[in-house]
Image (spheres, rainbow, N blue to C red):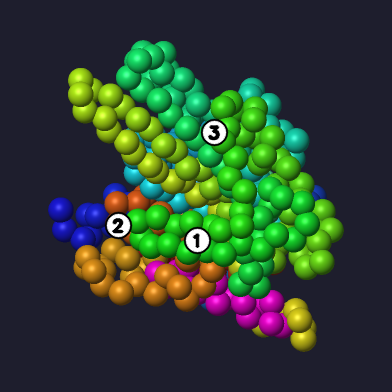
Amino acid sequence: MDSSSDKAVNIKTVARVRPCFDGTNRQSSLTINSESSTVTVKLPNKEQIFHLDNAFDENSTQDTIYKSVAQPIVVGFLGGTNGTIFAYGQTGSGKTYTMNGLERDTKADSPTRGIIVRAVENIFENLNATVEKNPCSFKYSLKCAFIQVYKERPFDLLQSGDVEVTIQGSREQVSFRGAKEFEVKSVEECIKYLRNGWKKRKTAGTSMNVESSRSHAIFILTLFTETIEGTLINNRTSRLNFGDLAGSERQKDTNNTGERFKEAGSINQDLLSLSRIIRYLPTAKQGTFIPYSSSKLTMLLRDSLGGNARTAIIVTIHSNCDFVRDTMSTLTFAENCK
Ligand code: ADP
Ligand code: MG
């Protein structure tokens, strides 16, 4: 397989438009063509077309997004392949809605539940079915962790207080010293940790006083499986990261000074490192140096970006023409990731 087809298989970039419901009925700046997977942005004197792997308009459901974007990566994870699914876009464009769904809305039948809850349901359904079929020859253990990266400092969202985390490791396996990993035995248990972490992220009651729009939140699942075939024991470990990234809005438009200015610089730097690495990965030969250590975010995702790992990038955008500059910059990021 050549590198371009590797790329096609392993990195998918899609756009999702958020519905406009602020009552102002602002003119749409976008045309979505799901057949050609393009987003056309209307500017005063011209149009610009962005080519992606898929484009979803504002009527797309959580179910459609999960099945077409996330499920293939979840299937890979169950089979031993690492994966990363993340949402990128300006604040208010639907990153948290896409990844997490509506707040408190994690019920099994709720149509608005997001990618993470659906993935967890899918994972347990599959693992439990495998155990049922092979009660003597298949065992698994699933663990979750939840880390927030703010201004290049990773913190544990599953412990109270500000517990800083040290990220170490290689392309084979990343470890996060200081963060608690919890073994989870059911969908409900896993969702409980997820919700606790989101709550902690939102309350901003820490000394960092961080608003969720300025930090990255990564929910991490690690799966160990043991399959016995005759005298052969096959152990596998895989990891799946779900990222709700900091808002990608153009920081230089705001009058940030002092701490805010440093913070804005750090967010831009992280997102830049991420897009550089993603752009670079498909053509990188084995053994090539890849600058994962250029940011904490890329260090954390290192074992699940590139190589055999599968990545889905969902860029979320507003159709509202007021946001056209940020929309253009988000779509440029997406096209650069392809
Ligand atoms: P972000 O995390 O990017 O800042 P949010 O996910 O919080 O943005 O979305 C902003 C608002 O828009 C929230 O009220 C959210 O529920 C709503 N929203 C976002 N995307 C959608 C969508 N596809 N369908 C319905 N509501 C959405
Ligand atoms: Mg959010």
Give the residue displayed 20% in from the left and 20% down from the top.
230
Give, as a single range, the part of the protein colored magenta.
261-277
* Mark 2, secondary structure of its residue: loop
Q: Quadrant of residue 51?
A: bottom left
Label pair 1/2, CB-CB below 8 angstroms: no
Amino acid type for the residue under numbered disc 3:
Val
User: Which numbered disc covers residue 307?
Assistant: 2
Crowdedness near tag 1: few (<14), some (14–19) or many (≥20) residues, C-alpha within 10 Å:
many
Q: Is residue 191 magenta?
A: no
Where residue 298 sits in the image (x, y, percent)? 48, 66
Verify whether residue 269 appears in magenta.
Answer: yes
Magenta span: predominant SS is helix
Q: Which residue is mark 1?
A: 300
Q: Amino acid at mark 1?
A: Leu
* 249 left or right, relative to 143: right
Q: Residues within 10 Å of mark 2 (few under 14, many from 20)?
A: some
Q: Residue at x 22, y 65 (%)?
A: 286
* Front of the two marks 1 and 2: 1
- Give the spatial CA distance, label 2 vs label 3: 24 Å
Which circle marks residue 120 in the picture? Answer: 3
Mark 1 / mark 2, whichever is N-terminal: 1
The answer to whether the residue labelled 2 contacts the one labelled 3, judged by CB atoms less than 8 Å apart, is no
Mark-to-mark CA distance, 1 and 3: 21 Å
Q: Examine the image and state in which quarter residue 258 appears.
A: bottom right
Q: Is residue 60 above or below residue 33?
A: above
**Residue 23 pos. (x, y %):** 80, 50
For mark 1, give the secondary structure: helix
Q: Residue 281, which numbered label?
A: none
Q: Residue at x 66, y 63 (%)?
A: 164
